[in-house]
Amino acid sequence: MADIVVVNPATEEVLAVIPAAGREDVRRAVDEAEEAFHKWSETPLRERGRVLLRAAQYIEQSAEELVRILVSESGKPIRDARAELRRAVEIFRSSAEEARYVLEGRIPRADAYEYPPGNEQRIVLEAREPVGVVAGALSYNNPASTFAHKIAPVIAAGNTAVVKPSTHTPLTALRMAELLRKAGVPAGVVEVVVGSGEEVFDELLENPKVAGISFTGSTAVGLQVAAKAAGRGKKFMIAPSGSDPAIVFADADLERAAATIARARFENAGQNCNATKRVFVERPVFEKFLDALLGKVASIKVGEPMDEATDMGPLISEKMVRAMEGFVADALSRGGELLYGGRRAARKGYFFEPTVVKFADGSAEARVLREEVFGPVLPVAPFDDEEEAVELANATQYGLQASVFTADYRKAFRVARAVRAGAVMVNDSTRVRLDALPYGGVKMSGFGWREGVRSTMYYFTEPKYYVLNVG
């Protein structure tokens, strides 16, 4: 097995060389997690909550160290990395706090039902009990917050976790796991395995000791994971891809819309599932909006991620740079007009310029208007009426999130209801995500249970009924 080489995408320097885990290593991790499950699941909820709160405290105290690790391996600008670490801390805290409510159980009234006879003599107690070992796959674009989502609510509910970080960004997860152990998370409750996705995840999917799968990644791989998990009777939670549209009406605050959309597209070099990836603008203000947008894009500072002034850093790899070049070439061959950027930046590292492509018709068959573009390329096209705006927004296989910009809230809600998405923001960014609430979409952006602090705890526990005959 080849070692895992972790590279700084801003400098192309090697940060670490990590031995790749093989299937035997993964089996060992699962065995340890299953053994730890029996004791951890019986640990009183108040104690599990205290451990999670201590973990949040240790992560918070080590934030600057973690930020530097995160920036160096992901290329995320340092200001954004700090925001992600704050988010991870809050996911741990909210998991500790929400668990008492999600897991509190209930007492259904048996005497409300005629059958079976004698229900007036029965007391029914419903409890929620953890499922066991839950395996997780982390994304490279948010290595700290996806670690928190795959770990905190899962272990708060009494499960144990085996997670595989992206081979691009394993160092953040490894350091966070060390902090969890320091905070008192018992051995085996959280296991981190670093290796190739296929080898590690095949074992996790096939291992009978793994009860559930939580996956963040592309729709194509997510579909394979879901099919394999379902075929083996495992619970699965998939956080897949998106191609989120923003619809801008003529009565919108164009400056505000342009600023919000520029941030939503180019944050983290466009490497976010819920980044704004397509923009449709009402024709009377199309050129005016483009002027405002280009002004915002021109002000984006692309540079060294550790620089406090940097707005946008590199893509994660050379492969992704080539992918952006392919998207731009395809767009220009299908009627797109390049308004800004469009090239690899002339510097060391995997930098690609913030790019804006104008289309005269939003129904063009360009890939940037149909596929998920996981990088800093933004297509913009006009529309003539609400019906066309909705049609264009719905013209992909994805339906994660969307935005509508207008001063007319009746129109906003009409359009929001018609757009097929898991969430629609009005005069706000597609990047809005409330971590405690379910996050996911429809169509190819939504299969399996939705991720979120509450929903994850609910999904990776099962109801169990205790029936007492007191007659």
Image (tube, rainbow, N blue to C red):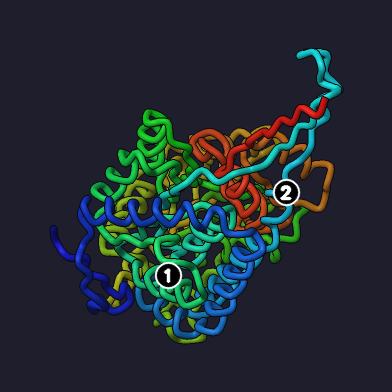
Residue at screen point 40% across, 46% down: 218
Q: Which x, y percent locates residue 4?
A: 22, 65
Extreme residue in the left direction: 1
Residue at screen point 52% across, 81% down: 63
Numbered marks: total: 2
From the viewer's perspective, is 34 left or right of 103? left
The answer to whether one can see residue 396 in this image is no
Q: Which mark is residue 104?
A: 2
Give SS at disc 2. loop
Residue at screen point 71% across, 37% down: 126
Mark 2 vs mark 1: give the one in front.
2
Nearer-the-camera pick, 417 or 362 = 417
Residue 61's place in the image compared with 210, above or below, is: below
Give SS at disc 1. helix
Are the residues flagged by discs 2 and 1 in contact, CB closer than 8 Å? no
Q: Which x, y percent locates residue 347?
A: 29, 78
Residue 401's place in the image compared with 44, above or below, is: above
The answer to whether one can see residue 199 in this image is yes
Residue 375's place in the image compared with 470, above or below, is: below
Circle 2 Cα neighbour tier, 10 Å, few/some/many (<14 / 14–19 / ≥20): few
Circle 1 Cα neighbour tier, 10 Å, few/some/many (<14 / 14–19 / ≥20): many
Nearest to N terminus: mark 2 or mark 1: 2
Give the distance between the C-alpha atoms of the residues marked 2 and 1, in whole angstroms.
28 Å
Quarter of the image where the C terminus is located:
top right
Question: What amino acid type is highlighted by mark number 2?
Answer: Glu
Nearer-the-camera pick, 398 or 436 = 436
* Residue 123 occupies quadrant: top right
Q: Which mark is residue 177?
A: 1
Q: Which x, y percent locates residue 1?
A: 13, 58
* Residue 434 occupies quadrant: bottom right
Question: What amino acid type is highlighted by mark number 1?
Answer: Ala
From the viewer's perspective, is 445 left or right of 435? left
